[in-house]
Amino acid sequence: MAGHVSMMTWRTCLGFVSTPGSGGAGHSSHLFFCLGVFIFSLVTYKPLEYDGYEYPVWGQAIGWIMALSSIMCIPVVMIYKIATTPGSFEQRWTILTTPSLKNQSEEAKQEFPQESYKLTENKGML
């Protein structure tokens, strides 16, 4: 794209770490990258300290609860949706990852029909 061959590290990062589906690993590479960062942060965790004062455990627990209260909504709703959608796992995955335009206005429905958003097989793409 730039007119020259890029370094191997750039191709690896762009293909497997940063953009889903652009390289060989796709979405699973994001999962493993995020999981690796999470595990690394757990292994290297140190209690919160500021200017020589170490905060109490109950204060750190309140901070984690506040942080997780918004973060945990995404996986909890994902698990709920996968568990309650009818069909095989593959059918549920396809249904849940396909855009739905049910709340679209009539004017927008005429301009962008639902059929244009159905999954198609990309031939010739990496």
Image (tube, rainbow, N blue to C red):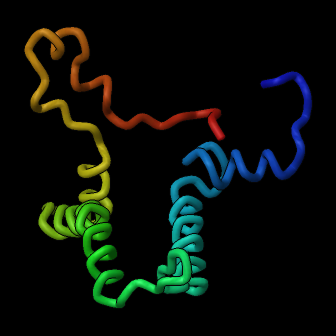
- Looking at the image, residue 97 sits to the left or right of residue 25; the answer is left
In the rendered image, is residue 12 in sight? yes
- Residue at 91% over, 28% down: 4
Quadrant assignment for the N terminus: top right
Residue 108 image point, x, y percent: 18, 13
Q: Residue furthest bottom?
A: 57
At 31% across and 63% down in the image, what residue appears? 71
Report which quarter residue 69 is drawn in.
bottom left
Q: Position of residue 30 (x, y in %)?
A: 54, 59
* Of the pair 41 and 86, the residue shown nearer to us: 41
Residue 22, position in %: x, y? 62, 43
119 to 37, vertically: above or below: above
Q: Say whether residue 23 is left or right of residue 108.
A: right
Looking at the image, residue 72 lies above or below residue 102: below
Instruction: Please name whichever residue, 49 or 105, is drawn nearer the observer in this view of the structure.
Output: 49
Closer to us: 63 or 35: 63
Say if 33 sits above or below 13 in the image. below
| Image point (13%, 62%), residue name | 86
Residue 51 location (% of width, % of height): 54, 76
The answer to whether residue 88 is seen in the rendering is: no
Of 33 and 25, which appears nearest the observer? Answer: 33
Q: At 18% from the left edge and 30% from the top edge, which residue is drawn? A: 101
